[in-house]
Image (spheres, helix red, strand yellow):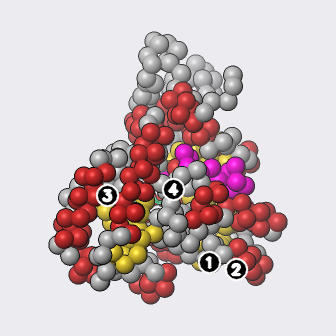
Amino acid sequence: MKEMKFETKVIHVGGEPDPVTGAIMPPIFQTSTYVQSSPGEHKGYEYTRSHNPTRTRLETLLASLENAKHCLVTSSGLAASSLIMHMLPKGSKIICGDDVYGGTYRLFTKVFQDMHEFHFVDTTNLSTFETAVDKIKPALIWVETPTNPLLKISDIKGISAIAKKNGAMTVVDNTFMSPYFQNPITLGADIVIHSMTKFINGHSDVVGGAMMFNSDDLHKKLFYLQNAIGPCQSPFDSWLVIRGIKTLALRMKAHQENAMKIAKFLETHPKVEKVIYPGLTSHPQHALAKSQMSGFGGMITFFVKGGIEESRRFLENVHLFALAESLGGVESLVDHPAIMTHASIPKEVREGLGIYDNLIRLSVGVEDCDDLIGDLNTAFGKV
Ligand code: P1T
């Protein structure tokens, strides 16, 4: 059969009707175990920590969306990151982009810090990055692009090529773009990870993670660890993601359309100091964004004029934008990274990167854009 387009894949790959009943929606195999006909003789499923048919359907679909051979679905995004850390030999050197989700920073600096050696480097500049690779000789490169929360963009093709030349593996956290707008494996990365909690599921009712890759060896090692350690996803949550992902293409287009309008609105607002959105020509890496992403996504970061007081007034006076951690759902959310999602990063490190108290992050939902702009305008009126 001809290779399907993205919009068709999200609905059909792994979505064959149930062979027993013809049910068009996949059954939820809400089971912990499977009957064997004789010891060791089974139909490929022994225990749900290892495999589950509902999860298998989701993994088949997600691998296909990232143009990868394999996918493993985990209980959270951080569970996927942890499995990759467990896979590396003790004492491995890791270069991590300097701006990452606060939980990723905490995982590396407070949980795995005695197991591996982490170096936080600005990966947006290829020549600085190459110098760091030469000096550190890392086993693994970890990049988020665009980053959370500063929306900095790293050149996936350039980084993967430098990594490969130096025998290092590249992991890209593709959570902010989803597989709809960016496919890091196609650009040369070895592993893509996602917090499925965000755009992939899209309805703020599941916590989950996924990692995709081509290598059979990586699959063998990571599957072994997932089964041995245990952070698998429940059949029901996998089923919810199978349901949510059907509209991923529609949602991403709507997120982006709204985000572009809101970014332009913010850029001209007198109470706004600066707006960061990869789709704006004012974004320092707009050209790179255009070349490696097929869209700019639904995340915007901006600096309100003033400090913590002005931020608080704004955040207490939005109504459609809900003040909450997380992102990527159909409903709009607003976050204060310094106090909320990135509080685990020490203040001096945070401020060194530019995450100040007047930084506000928007996850633009798919509501009517005039309503959203009206909501922001009202809140600015109270600042
Ligand atoms: O929350 P979890 O599913 O474990 O995913 C962690 C994670 C990984 N990578 C990125 C880029 C993320 O943004 C996250 C989670 N982020 C938030 C909860 C947040 O509000 O930024």
Quarter in which the N terminus is drawn: top right
Residue 104 is tagged as: none
Residue pointed to by mark 4: 296
Residue 188 on the magenta segment: yes
- Label 4 vs 2, first from the N-terminus: 2
- Label 4 vs 1, first from the N-terminus: 1
Q: At label 4, which amino acid type do we have?
A: Phe
Q: Is residue 215 left or right of residue 203?
A: right
State the residue at coordinates (66%, 64%).
Answer: 155
Select label 4 or label 1 by which is in front: 4
Ligand 1 lies in which image quarter? bottom left
Residue 191 on the magenta segment: yes
Select label 3 or label 1 by which is in front: 3
Measured Cα–Cα span from mark 2 to mark 1: 8 Å
Q: Is residue 287 left or right of residue 326?
A: right
Q: At label 2, which amino acid type do we have?
A: Thr
Q: Secondary structure at mark 4?
A: loop
Write the start and end of the magenta stretch as one range: 179-195
Q: Are marks 3 and 4 in contact (CB under 8 Å)?
A: no
Residue pointed to by mark 1: 121
Measured Cα–Cα span from mark 3 to mark 4: 17 Å
Q: At label 1, which amino acid type do we have?
A: Val
- Label 2 vs 1, first from the N-terminus: 1
- Label 2 vs 3, first from the N-terminus: 2
State the residue at coordinates (29%, 47%).
Answer: 368
Q: Secondary structure at mark 2?
A: helix
Q: Are marks 2 and 1 in contact (CB under 8 Å)?
A: yes
Measured Cα–Cα span from mark 2 to mark 3: 35 Å
In the rendered image, the residue lying farthest to the bottom is 348
Q: Is residue 283 left or right of residue 334?
A: right
